[in-house]
Image (cartoon, coloured by chain):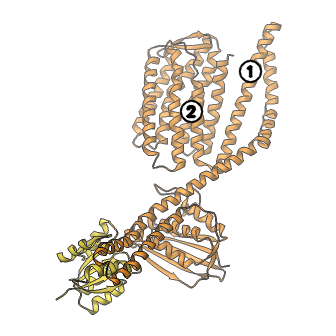
Chain colours: A yellow, B orange
Amino acid sequence: MRKKILICDDEEGIRESLKLILEKDYDLVFAQNGDEAIHSMRTMPIDITILDIKMPRKDGLETLKELMKINPKSRVIIATGYKSVDIAKEAINIGAIDYIVKPFDSKTIMKSIEKL
Amino acid sequence: MTWLSLLYLTSSLFVISIGVLALSNNYKSPINRSFFIASLSSFVWLFFYGLMVSSDLTKGLLFAKIGHAAVPFIQVSLLHYTLRVLSARHVKILLSFSYLYAICMSLLALFTPLHFSVLTRYWWGLYPKGNLLMYIEFVICCIVSIALILFVSYNYFKNTKHLRADESNKLKYITISIAVLPLSTIDYLPKIGIGIVPLGAIFVMLFVSLNAYAILKHRMFDIDIVIRKGLIYSLLVTTITLVYLTFIFLLENVFRDFVGYKSLPLTIFTVTFFIVIFQPLKNKIQYFVDKYFFQGSIDQLRQENMKLLSELQRSEKLKAVGTLAAGMAHEIKNPLTSIKVFTEYLPKNYQDKEFINKFERIVGSEVEKINEIVGQLLDFAKPRPLEIKESNVLKLMDETLDLLNNEFIKHRIKIVRYYDITPSLRIDPSQIKQVFLNIILNAVEAMKNKDRMLKINIGISNNKSVAISIKDTGCGINKDDLVHIFDPFFTKKESGTGLGLSVVHGIIEKHNGSIKVESTEQEGTNITILLPAR
């Protein structure tokens, strides 16, 4: 059975890029902001989430906290342009499993997902 | 009286005038105080050596002893001053030891023959013939001078890149002056038997001038004009005094040679005559300088200060650009990711029409996005005159908050916006964005506590103005500082220029608006800007 991946990023370019990389092997659900991602997590089974840190209104870390509340076993990969160790640490402390730094390529994404 | 004597006396007047000016400019500053001690000691040395050079042997020895007693204090106070200027730490023991050394040397010079016991008559006048302690003092003086030059040069080359333009200039003046100062040790040479003319006073004057300029220039603006005036007048007084002393000298010689009459009453008459004409003459010259000469200087100073101010404003702006650039680097990574992934898939999918359509749309728009981001940064960094046009304040605030998103995420700051519908205003969007940016960057820096929240409230106030309030939950500002926050160069930050809020104030005033600051320590600060609605 194909796994379902939730992609949450406010940038269309990133959503389309991840679609290009993942659509062949996974079922994809898209969210443009934190609230849409939370809604998807509540309404359907999600195997993996790829979550952007910098989003308008509700940022990635806040969204991550709520996702973990809904499903503490959620497997979330954070994708962001920040190389800051503090943010990575905080995301891991909240419950994220991995951390990908932009600009990424298909290999990095596939490697990170296949690990899970 | 000999020409060397005149040089010493003139230098002593010059040095003490500038020392007093520096002290009166800011008597609380340790830099200005240590500079004054150096000037005062130099004055004592120059003045009594001036008297000594053209005295008889008995009086000359007394003047030489008093003058030389000040010399160790010059050396130590200069060390003190240099360390203060360079903000050197942990130097209390060194300074205490140095002043103790100066007191001992001074007492020994005054009351023992260890430095010198006789004077030698050279062609330029009388001068002390050094004993053992004079040689030791000379060696110590050379070592300290070399150490100071190395220390100051090291500091200059190490720090100059990290300093603001005015700080770097100040350090440059002081470095050059410290390098000049050891030349004044030339005055030791006749004391140790090398019959060279002791012209060290010239280098002392040069040192004092450069340092006075550095200290006073640092404060700038109106005070600078006052001080520059003061410098010109002190030079003037010195010149008049010089002319006055020359006259006495010439008249005495003329009367002695032609009349054969050594006249105390004549000298008293000459002195009285010059005392009577001295003040009106000085006033006339001051009036002349003010009316015909100084006007140009004030304009020049204004221009120079404007140049310096705009340089500093620009450095403040570039500091903000640095923060923005960090945020923008992140913004660029998003479009870069899309371009990277789509390019990676291009060779495999170039015949897939759907992919090519998407490629064109996504990659095209991502390249445009990068162009826009870079354009925004360049737009902000570029200096430009006031350019008023219809602008939406809400949009400007959102754009500023977007620019700073990187900072908010990094410092975990929550942004809360309360926006009412507001009319578009006739403002300079670029400058108003700079106002928002400066205030918000200050707020970000002030929030080191746990609950970090920035509340932005924009709405209509009294039907006449648009009120923009930016409230943080930072450390707040104490009452004493609150009245000074818009003063240029007032800062409590270690790396701040103190110009951020002064620039904000200037821009709001140019828009006929007003700005109000309310702050409670440990609770936060609320800055409200009122801009006329029409």
Q: Could you say whether the residue bearing mark 2 is in a helix, strand or loop?
A: helix
Alpha-carbon neighbours of circle 1 within 10 Å: few (<14), some, or many (≥20)? some
Indicate the quadrant where residue B512 lies. Answer: bottom right
Q: Position of residue B80 (x, y in %)?
A: 48, 36
Horizontal side, residue B328 vs residue B188: left or right: left
Q: Position of residue B267 (x, y in %)?
A: 78, 18
Horizontal side, residue B353 vs residue B247: left or right: left
Residue at left offset 30%, top offset 89%: A40
Q: Residue furthest bottom?
A: A43
Indicate the quadrant where residue B459 lies. Answer: bottom right
Q: Position of residue A4 (x, y in %)?
A: 23, 86
Chain containing mark 2:
B
Relative vertical location of residue A23 with respect to residue B302 in this rendering, above or below: below
Q: Could you say whether the residue bearing mark 1 is in a helix, strand or loop?
A: helix
Residue picked out by circle 1: B246
Residue picked out by circle 2: B207
User: Is there any visible trace of residue A61 in the rendered image?
Assistant: no
Q: Amino acid at mark 2?
A: Phe
Q: Position of residue A71 (x, y in %)?
A: 24, 86
Q: B102 or B491: which is nearer to us?
A: B491
Alpha-carbon neighbours of circle 2 within 10 Å: few (<14), some, or many (≥20)? many
Marks 1, 2 in one chain: yes
Which quadrant is the N terminus of chain A positioned in? bottom left
Q: Amino acid at mark 1?
A: Thr
Chain containing mark 1:
B
Q: B199 or B271: which is nearer to us?
A: B199
Q: Residue furthest top?
A: B260
